[in-house]
Image (cartoon, rainbow, N blue to C red):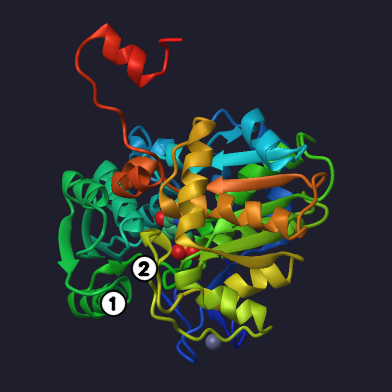
Amino acid sequence: MKHKFLGYQCSLCKAEYEADEIIYTCPNDGGNLDIVYDYSSLKQNVSADTIINSPEASLWRYLPLLPVNEVHGRETPLQAAGWTPNFSPPALREQLGLQSLWVKDESRNPTASFKDRASAVVVARAQEIGAEVVVTASTGNAGAALAGMAAAAGQKAVIFAPRTAPPAKIAQLLIYGADVLLVDGNYDQAFDLSILAANEFGWYCRNTGYNPFTLEGKKTAALEIWECLINRKLIDGPLAIFVSVGDGNIISSLHKGFKDLQALGWLDGMPRIFGVQAEGSAAIANAFSIGVEEITPVAADTLADSISVDLPRDGVRAVRAASQTGGAYLTVSDAEILVAIADLGQAGIFAEPAGAAAYAGLHKALKQAIIGSEDPVLVFNTGSGLKDVNAAMQSVAPAIIIEPTLRAVEQALDLAG
Ligand SMILES: *Cc1c(COP(=O)(O)O)cnc(C)c1O
Ligand SMILES: [Zn+2]
């Protein structure tokens, strides 16, 4: 097989592996593998202008910088992954007192979360290696994304999720036709079981922080920030990026995307990357705050199910994404997340709890003067509020129920004068 990448390098022991030698993590120490490119050959063969002039309105515009060849089924929802809008809502700029604020809305992906970026690229990889079945463990979104992208590509998917996953996410899994196994346990138990099953039955495993291709798909978000905002000079000064963190794969992927761009000579400087965790699921933030890379598991407890993780599977690279870019980690309470859902809603953006956590973290960073009013900021909404309507309802007052009369309308809306 002809590969578009040189091989893999372990993020812990730095051991290098050939492209055909390995599939998931480092055999020495279980470390996450980085995919290694031949940047000098990429520099010769790919120009920034070719990408900038691409008509492709999806993450596939970055195919030259991805470790996969062509994906089959591009005329399906696979072609809608990525290339999400960057909003600059005046209401939020005003509320936060920021001059330059961008919201990158990942709820606009085909299955309504950031995870489509990873799943689209993993499905392309599965096609290349001729995998018959693709499996993942998921708190819900990674599974929905794999089920949706696999359905689009005509690929068979098996999903392990905790039985407590929000019903909308379980509905997505079922509707996309995956084999759905709801584990009577938490995400971490579903994770371990899915790997056992993948090994036993010969399935190709997408698991976050395990399969090196997820990070490569997710890095396209960094490429978009570069292309749409930094390169178009819509941002004045070093950008601060806020993103919510569970396993730590998204934040690591943003770091990798910007490092790729630097290696190509297309990006000067490095955005500061800020990770936001729920107070009740803060294993990576804990490590960052005591200045270590080693991750100690917690007993996760937060209403933000997508970032509820005992042992983050990409913790080391996630710590580095903040420490090596001049960023930091913040933690937010469930109550602060609920407020953030309502705040984003006021600007027309509907986030699930994990999606809104980043905005809550930005709020806190401003209060603590980690960010100043002149710093340009981009905050991610990583998932749609429709995925967890129960949580959304906790962030607002209930709707008013009235008799079907004009008088009742007057009274309810206090219009009587
Ligand atoms: C998965 C997910 C995250 C966190 O991504 P990690 O790679 O696990 O850190 C944040 N928000 C949403 C909506 C997600 O689905
Ligand atoms: Zn290693």
Residue 385 visible (yes or no) = yes
* Residue positioned 46% across, 10% down in the render: 417
Q: Are marks 1 and 2 in contact (CB under 8 Å)?
A: yes
Q: How many marks?
A: 2
Mark 2 Cα shell of 10 Å, populated few (<14), some (14-19), many (≥20): many
Helix, strand or loop at label 2? It is: loop
Which residue lies most toward the top here?
406
Q: Is residue 414 above or below residue 33?
A: above
Report x, y in % for residue 19: 49, 72
Report x, y in % for residue 234: 77, 34
In the rendered structure, find residue 3 and report the number of the disc placed on it: none
Which residue lies most toward the front here?
417
Which residue lies most toward the bottom here?
28
Mark 1 Cα shell of 10 Å, populated few (<14), some (14-19), many (≥20): many
Q: Is residue 382 above or below residue 198?
A: above
Residue placed most toward the observer, 270 or 294 = 294
User: Which residue matches tag 1?
Assistant: 195
Q: Amino acid at mark 1?
A: Ile
Helix, strand or loop at label 1? It is: helix
Q: Is residue 179 left or right of residue 117?
A: left
Q: Amino acid at mark 2?
A: Asn
